[in-house]
Amino acid sequence: MRSLPRSGVLLLAGALLAAGCSAGSTPSPGAAPDSPDAPLRIGFTAEPANLDFTRTDGAAIPEALLVNVYEGLVELDQATGEIVPALAESWTVSPDGLVYDFTLREGVTFSNGEPFTADDVKFSIERVQSDAWTISLKNGMDVVSGVEVVSPTQVRVTLSRPSNNWLFSMTTRIGAMFDPSGVADLANTPVGTGPYTVAEFRRGDRLVLTRRDDYWGEPPAIPRIELQYFRDATAAVNALLTDGIDVIGTVQAPEALAQFDGDDRFQVIEGTTNGEVTLAMNNASGPTSDVRVRRAIAMAIDHQAVLDTAWAGRGATIDTMVPPTDPWYEPMPDVTPYDPEAARALLAAAGMPNPSLRMRIANLPYAVAAAQVVQSQLAAVGIRTEIEPLEFPARWLEEVFRGADYDLSIVSHVEPRDIRTFGDPDYYWRYDNPEVQRLLAESEAGGPEQQVASLRQVGRIIAEDAAADWLFVLPNLIVADADVRGLPQNRIGESFDVTALSRG
């Protein structure tokens, strides 16, 4: 953790006062703020539509519940990116890469009191493969051909083919373990093995987690966590300054960071994430179905200027759907360099010198700010855009993600190693490239070197096709009271892990 240097951009007091406090900024009743039993209040902007990540896409639900309420057999070490034991204390893999034998921890129970056994592993994996799961990420379990209960603490998973990605995908939401008697109302009543349970969920306000007394592992230090949701980023900053919350979990107003500089009441953490802020382009319909138009769009955008203007220079520019934390990261600025003249020539060659496009974006601060810069830059080469912010997650997921009713869109993709989405023609970019699909399959079957080589090729092909355009990688920016400990330097998974937090 470190203090950030003064950025030279101050948050105007008038704007802050005008925005005022939104829902979520009311102090919690109960213990005094400095009491050991006081809740830790964490502010976010994107809130869950419900609590069921098996049927609702988007990052807000696993951000709140994964690791904290739900656990998997394995998890990601946030410091190293390595896969480490969770509910499985160990595992072995057969020489042909097809059979995984897991040894489960003993004495683990779900929050409803039911014991966790190998039967629950079988149920959970097979449930992902059933119609009960509807989210797009469920295809990560397609490679599983069978699950065998060897004993209450031994389970064997057999794959239909070797897969370099399957165990990693088990660190995501599709690897969460469920109790068969606890899935009747996941949207309102999650039942997991994690150290917290959901005590309260009020849409537009807060989600409250309370510590389990019967948790199988080391109990977390904070007995009550309140995730409070704000309508805008300024309101979250205001709440922190007025002791309405203790932490801003994901800073959505980076220009505001300067006012915390030199104030010893607060700490600022800056690290990285795998959240690619992506300018999606519809590859199947409208003007963006023409690769020349898509490449023109990519070459009309000055990505560093977008980052500097929209996000105060925080974060990093990327050239394809690979953040710097992935093993196959490779800069490729040569593919679609900033070149407005070349962009105009491509539009002319496509017979569309002045296309009009609908830019239907998530109504989140980074997306709105980036869209305004992109709109201006595209206008400079003759591309007209109409920005339409959509309520996120519900309306954006329904109309853009599921319906593909858009020309351009902007949202951050935080799912780990999501370059694989370009192998799915039904994913919302509607990109269908057999060579990319072949390389993705090849990356699964070979060794680590083959995986890296194949995925680098995929990264280059989708950049050459301008299957999307990648504006920047979001930084991990957190502002918190000075006494909060255990906040993550980097965020490379889906969860905001509150289990390591404490005060001191």
Image (cartoon, grey):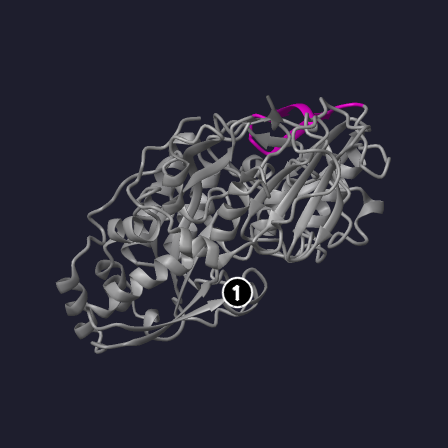
Q: Over which residues does the magenta segment extend?
A: 88-106
Q: Is residue 375 left or right of residue 203?
A: left
Q: How many marks?
A: 1
Q: Give the quarter of the image for residue 221.
A: top right
147 in magenta: no
Q: Is residue 154 above or below residue 111?
A: above
Q: Which of the pair 241/114 is nearer the observer?
A: 241
Secondary structure character of the magenta stretch overall: strand
Q: Give the quarter of the image for residue 409.
A: bottom left
Question: Could one spot residue 150 in this view of the protein?
Answer: yes
Residue at left 41%, top 51%? Answer: 13
Task: Please name the residue that numbered disc 1 is placed on.
Answer: 396
104 in magenta: yes
Tell me where residue 337 appears, x and y as whole percent: 20, 53
Q: Quadrant of the C terminus?
A: top right
Q: Which of the pair 265/208 is nearer the observer?
A: 265
Q: Is residue 431 left or right of residue 41?
A: left
Q: Is residue 453 above or below residue 252?
A: above
Kind of residue at badge 1: Trp
Tell me where residue 435 appears, x and y as whole percent: 37, 53
Residue at left 52%, top 65%? Answer: 396
Residue at left 51%, top 63%? Answer: 401
Residue at left 60%, top 38%? Answer: 170
Element type where label 1 sits in the image: helix
Within 10 Å of the Cα at label 1, are there few (<14), some (14-19), or many (20+) other Cα atoms?
Answer: many
Tell me where residue 469 appears, x and y as whole percent: 33, 56
